[in-house]
Image: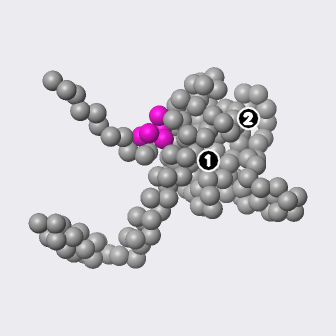
Amino acid sequence: MATIKKALSWQDSSKQLMTQYLKKTKSPAGSLYVLSAYGDLHLQGGKATKIDMTTLGSLAASVAAAGEGLGELMKVKGSPIQFGEAKNIFWFDRLGPDWLLVGIRCPHQAAGLKSLITNLKKGLTQSKKTSEALDGMDIGSIDSQLNAKMGSLK
């Protein structure tokens, strides 16, 4: 009997890629977070505990904005912002205008993050399109739209 492989959601595949990255960089205590530009947690991977997400989100958003301002002054684009060294590193990297990738207790290795970042950008772009399409609609309107679409499929 053939087994059917379940397709992973982009969130699940992103979490797997996060876990693989942490293993490859030998960062068992490390963690990765995807935050909105406003500091809201969207996705996380790794083992870091006891992290105040409100503080992390606020810090990430403000440091990213400050880093962009400095980058414009110094004519530098796309470099991650890093604090600390060795096992105590803390970094932020932009995933476009709306999202940040944050690493705690793991190094920033651009080559190692490439597949994760590609997967995240694809999923986050689709997620944003979906939320923009639903923005401002009440639940009754959403239900009627879905029913109309489902009726047209018959």
- Residue 15 magenta-highlighted: yes
Q: Which residue is drawn at 66% across and 36% down?
A: 111
Q: Nearer the viewer, residue 136 or 145?
A: 145
Report x, y in % for residue 151: 14, 70
Q: How far apart are marks 2 and 1 (CA)?
A: 14 Å
Numbered badge on residue 89: 2
Numbered badge on residue 118: none
Q: Which amino acid does label 2 sit on?
A: Ile
Numbered badge on residue 101: 1
Q: In which quarter of the image is the C terminus?
A: bottom left
Number of disc labels: 2
Numbered range of the magenta stretch: 12-16
Q: Quadrant of the N terminus?
A: top left
Report x, y in % for residue 8: 36, 40
Tell me if I can see residue 37 in this picture.
Answer: no
Instruction: Please tell me whether mark 2 or mark 1 is closer to you in this view.
Output: 1
